[in-house]
Each structure stands twice: as structure tokens, then as C-alpha cells.
Amino acid sequence: MTNRRFDFLRCALALLGSVTFGALPAVAYEAAKPNIVWIMAEDIGPDLGCYGTPALQTPNIDKLAASGLQLERAYCTAPICSTNRSAMMTGMYQTTIGAHHHRSTIGKLPEPIRPITHFLKQQGYYCAIGCGYGKKTDFNFTVDKEDQFDGNDWKFRKEGQPFFAHIQLGVTHRGGWWEKNRKESADPVDPAKVALPPYLPDHPAIRLDWATYLDQMEKADEQVGEIVARLEKEGLIDNTLIIFIGDNGRCVFRGKGFVFEDGIRIPAIFSWPGHIKPGTKSNELVSVIDMSAEVLAVAGAKIPSYMEGRPFLEEGVEPREYVFAARDRWDEVYDKCRTIVGKRYKFIRNDMPEVPYFTTHAYEEKVRPIRPVLWQLYQDGKMNDVQAYLMQPQKPKEELYDLENDPWETKNLIEFPAYAAEADKLRKALQDWEETTDDKGRYPEPAGHITKQEQKAIADRLQSLKDGTAAYPQ
């Protein structure tokens, strides 16, 4: 390469504002004990301007991403809130601690496991929940009093005390406020401009539903802007690590509740002035349980030896080869899916293939208005093969996808001989993970873990399947 060519590339990179892709940045931890603000929006995918999503405006989150690290391949351990939150709060797979059914209660955590608040408090942190926004916890276990959040706002801490603030943005969770927010928006997202995934038919009702979802992303962006503005006003921004993530995938069909990418891949942004290089992007695999470990590392806490998550910003840390996720009972619907995601390929094992993707589920019937639209389009023969794939009466026992060439997971490669070796490798790695972590999904759910409300819902569903009154053929 000529010197002139080298100088040209160096200047071009400078003009790009030091945006980098690839390995995670090494972060030097100091004894400053920064404040930590963990913002978690419910039921969202990486549908933000900084992730390249068209038709919407998310300037505050985009600015946050530009100021720090944007993870391109961050994953939940489960596609449903309570199970993933249980993992996130402990740095442990929900399947390891028995908190893998939504919703359930295992009572106290098994010894010696503690929530991350336990270790943050040992480091002198004031732990706040909500701070003017959502205070949802939704863990499938009870928390000892000494490990609970100290209050609902960091303003109640002692002078000079570092704080950990866990803030929930519930606006993106499905609810009646979706339509209200859209009506009140000065510039609602144009349904004609949204980019639908190939697995959804191009129908006006589906476009409107997707646009309404993006409206909530814009509303969440406003709230992120408010939180950052408060930190700036109080002179805290320069000594605060801000984390923005989703609690599971987007609440649309094939998203939340499914172990496809749209159910488990989430946005994840880390901003820490003076510590994380602005404009950094990484394609390394990161699990939410790693984020829990990272929080403890930043706070100066010793990572418990039992913790399955691991810090990922420290110098010398080897990137993950795989991330894992699991789907088990969701309310009244029993299912069992396990998935392993590698650098390029993804393997899914469906242990209950008799449970259809498009199964009867009270929650989904209530909050996903396009379900009857999808069913009617399928009945009328107005779906192509990709769109009709999820309407089949049974799931395949195994699935294999090439995420590099098929990011929407539209072509199952499991039956192709050319991919047999890759499937075997991932299949074995998944089995090894289940055995190593003692995946509790291999055992029947203890009756005492099921709430009375869920017991009734399960019984009602079984009866509807038995007498043939279920919404969809099973």
C-alpha cells in the first residue's frame, strides 16, 4: 500500500468519527465507583435509528449510542420477561436456578446465589428502582429484605453515595396506551414507510400494527432523553455508566415468546464518558447475564465464582463462542425450546414439536391484534411459503439457520447434508451446556412453583383443547 493510500484511509477513518466494528473495547476500571443507570425498555428489538431502522426518529438513544458502545449481537437468555429478568438479576441462566417458567415462583434463590443488588450494596451503592418511571421487577423468586432495592429514586441516597438505578420503560409493552400514544403523537410513524420482515404478509392492518410499535419506540426515546437530561442537570453524567437494553424481543408475532432472533436479540448500548470510546460498535456475542457481571465489575465488586455471566469489557477477556436461550412454559402454554447461537449459525431444538408456533394463548389473543388477520390470510391461501411456515400444525424437531445469509431465519437448513457437520457441532454444544448448567427444564415443574392464577389458566386451556373450542387447531 502506498503512503498516499495509507494517508487517505487514515483521514477517512478520522472523518468517520472513530466508529469501529469488531472486538469489544478494553475498559480500564478505576476506584471511582461510578453511578450505574440501567434503563430497560420492555418488549423491544433493535428497532432504533442507530441500528438502521427506517421510518422512525430516536435521536436521544442514537446520541447515547454514538457516545459509547453499541452491541450488534446482544441476546436474552429467554424470550419472555420474568424468566430473562430472573437471569439478568442474578447473572445466572434461569434454567440453572429453576426460574425458567413464566410466571412462577421458586421462593428463595438456591444457595449461594444472590441478586446483584446484594453485591452492589456491599460496595456501598444505593440501589434505586423506578426513579420516576416503571418499578417493575417481575422475578420468579423472592428477594431477601437486605437485598431489595433501597428506594424508588437515587435522590434519597446519602450525599456522595454512588447509586445503581434500575429504570423500566413500560411504554413499549403492549397495552391500551399504544393507540393513545399514536393518536397524541405530532408525527406518528407512517405505516407505508415501515420495513416489514419477510415472514409477515404485506397487509394494511399489519403495517399499522408495526408502525404503532415504532411509535412506542419514539416515546421511549423521549423518556431516555429525560433521564439523560436529569443526569446532566444534577452534574452526574460524567461519572455515570448508562446502560440501555430491552428485556426481551419485540412484542409482535414471531418475536416475544419465540427463540427466533426477533424474540431474543435486543438492543444494548453502554455509555461511560472517559471510559468507553465514543462511536464503538461490536459484533461479538454478549448475553444479558454478562451485563450483570459487567455491572459488578464496574462497581469494584468481586464476581461470585458461581456466576455464569462474565464481564466482557475488561482487557484480555475472551469473547463468547456461543450464547444460549430457552423457552419454557409461558402462562398456560407449556413448551420447551432450546437454542444456541454461534458466530454464523444458529441451532434450535423443539422438545415439544406438537405445540404449534401459532398456538392458542390467552395473552397473545388479547394483545396482538394481527393474530386473527394472520389466521384469516392463511385460511384464504394468501401467504407464501415463508409466511405460512409458522402456521403449520407442528414445529420441526430441529432448526438450523445461517444468520449471515438469512438473518430473518426463513430457510431451515437442518435437512441439508451440506450442513450436517455444523448441526452436529451445535447440537452437541447445546447438550453439553444443558448438562453443565443442570438445565432444570429437563425435570417436571414442581406444583408448588405454579401460582393459583396460572393453575386455573392451564386447566382452562387443557379443557379447551379437549373439547375442541381452542381458537386454532392443535
Image: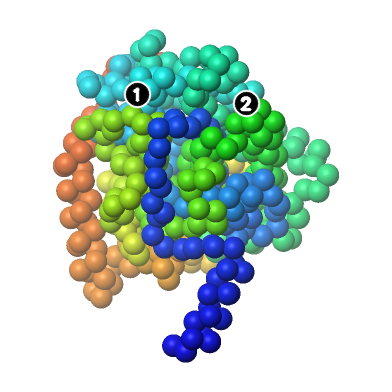
- Give the answer, above or below, for where 209 lies relative to 412: above
Work out whether residue 127 or residue 334 is closer to the camera in this orientation and state it: 127
Looking at the rendering, in which quadrant would you find the C terminus?
top left
Q: Is residue 362 visible?
A: no
- Whole-angstrom CA distance, mark 1 to mark 2, is 24 Å
Count residues near mark 2 (Cα–Cα under 10 Å), then give few for <14, some for 14-19, many for 20+: some
Q: Residue at x 64, y 61 (%)?
A: 195
Looking at the rendering, in which quadrant would you find the N terminus?
bottom left
Percent across and percent down for residue 212 are 69, 46
Q: Secondary structure at mark 2?
A: loop
Q: Is residue 301 visible?
A: yes
Work out whether residue 195 or residue 219 is closer to the camera in this orientation and state it: 219
> Is residue 302 toward the left or the right of residue 421 in the image?
right
Percent across and percent down for residue 437 are 20, 38
Amino acid identity at mark 2: Tyr
Farthest-out residue, top: 145
Find disc 2 in the rendering and name its residue.
133
Percent across and percent down for residue 166 are 51, 28
Percent across and percent down for residue 271 are 53, 44
Asked if the residues shown at circle 1 and circle 2 are in contact, with their CB atoms under 8 angstroms apart, the answer is no
> Is residue 208 toward the left or the right of residue 441 in the image?
right
Find disc 1 in the rendering and name its residue.
119
**Nearer the viewer's eye, disc 1 or disc 2?**
1
Q: Residue at x 44, y 37 (%)?
A: 80
Q: Residue at x 42, y 16 (%)?
A: 148
Amino acid identity at mark 1: Phe
